[in-house]
Image (tube, helix red, strand yellow):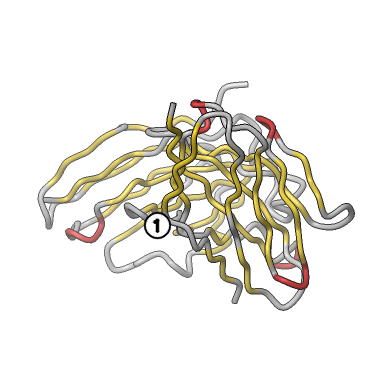
């Protein structure tokens, strides 16, 4: 099966600019996640979608980050305006179901590396 | 809230030697436990998982992990390391079905393999 697709792979922007990342999950996967991975740290969940609805966005900095999954398939994560501390790898993951990470493991994309200068 | 600690930031091992990566978790009950591997420029790949039953679980790529409730640990091991095992390894915990799929990751251990 095709994996989780993310684009772009790399992005360099200046602070206060805006940026958007795109994710296409594995076909049939209802749940989609965006994680932020700062250099030297483990991934941190930003937002979780079940189909086109938000399940958890408690750690999403809503003053500058937004995400949508309008048709319940692919998703876009946006940062506006970007800060230096947003430099990180943004990972998208998908799973078949939302209610059991044990039975429905996460499949990760290769990520988008964002550098804010 | 659950948390995960990986005490070793870097580990260097010789090819063919054994490897053990430490993971300690904090959670009120027995959580779901996972080990993931991340090669440079790649996403995370699931190595193995544990919830109940036999405390020694086998995973892919020849890895195994042992759950020790008394020590709140879930250490990852491999008897003989290959150069291709050089990567970053993450331990993760999820609280269980009631809380959905919220994974909390440790800070990771980077493994370097010497020829």
Q: Circle 1 — which element?
A: loop
Residue furthest toward the top?
Answer: A1
Instruction: State which quarter of the image contains the C terminus of chain B.
Output: top left
Q: Residues within 10 Å of mark 1 (few under 14, many from 20)?
A: some
Q: Can you give x and y, in whole percent of width and height, for residue A11 in the image?
A: 22, 38
Q: Can you give x and y, in whole percent of width and height, for residue B60 in the image?
A: 69, 32
Camera-side residue: A87 or B51?
Answer: B51
Camera-side residue: A117 or B81?
Answer: B81
Q: Quarter-wise, where is residue B63 in the image?
A: top right
Q: Residue at x 58, y 29 (%)?
A: B16
Asked if residue B104 lies left or right of residue A99, the reply is left
Q: Can you give x and y, in whole percent of width and height, for residue A16 in the image?
A: 12, 57
Q: Can you give x and y, in whole percent of width and height, for residue B39 in the image?
A: 45, 34
The residue tagged 1 is A41
Please say if B16 is above or below B33: above
Asked if residue B10 lies left or right of residue B46, the reply is left
Q: Residue at x 59, y 43 (%)?
A: B19
Asked if residue A49 lies left or right of residue B52, the reply is left
Residue furthest toward the right?
Answer: B53
> Mark 1 falls within which chain?
A
Q: Residue at x 66, y 61 (%)?
A: B94
């Amino acid at each position: 099966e095709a994996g989780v697709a993310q684009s772009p792979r790399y992005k360099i922007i200046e602070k206060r600019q805006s940026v958007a990342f795109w994710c296409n999950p594995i076909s049939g996967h209802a749940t989609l996640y965006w994680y932020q991975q700062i250099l030297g740290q483990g991934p941190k969940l930003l937002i979780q979608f079940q189909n086109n609805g938000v399940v958890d966005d408690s750690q999403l900095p809503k003053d500058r980050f937004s995400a949508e999954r309008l048709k319940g398939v692919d998703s876009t994560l946006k940062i506006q305006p970007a800060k230096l501390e947003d430099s990180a790898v943004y990972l998208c993951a998908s799973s078949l179901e939302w209610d059991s990470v044990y039975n429905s493991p996460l499949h990760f994309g290769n990520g988008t590396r964002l550098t804010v200068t | 809230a659950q948390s995960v600690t990986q005490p070793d930031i870097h580990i260097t091992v010789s090819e063919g030697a054994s490897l053990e990566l430490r993971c300690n978790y904090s959670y009120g009950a027995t959580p779901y436990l996972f080990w993931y591997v991340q090669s440079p420029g790649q996403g995370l790949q699931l190595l193995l998982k544990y919830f109940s039953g036999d405390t020694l679980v086998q995973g892919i790529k020849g890895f195994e992990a042992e759950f020790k409730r008394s020590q709140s640990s879930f250490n990852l091991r491999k008897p003989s390391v290959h150069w291709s095992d050089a990567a970053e390894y993450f331990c993760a915990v999820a609280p269980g079905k009631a809380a959905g799929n919220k994974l909390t990751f440790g800070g990771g251990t980077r493994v370097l393999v010497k020829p």
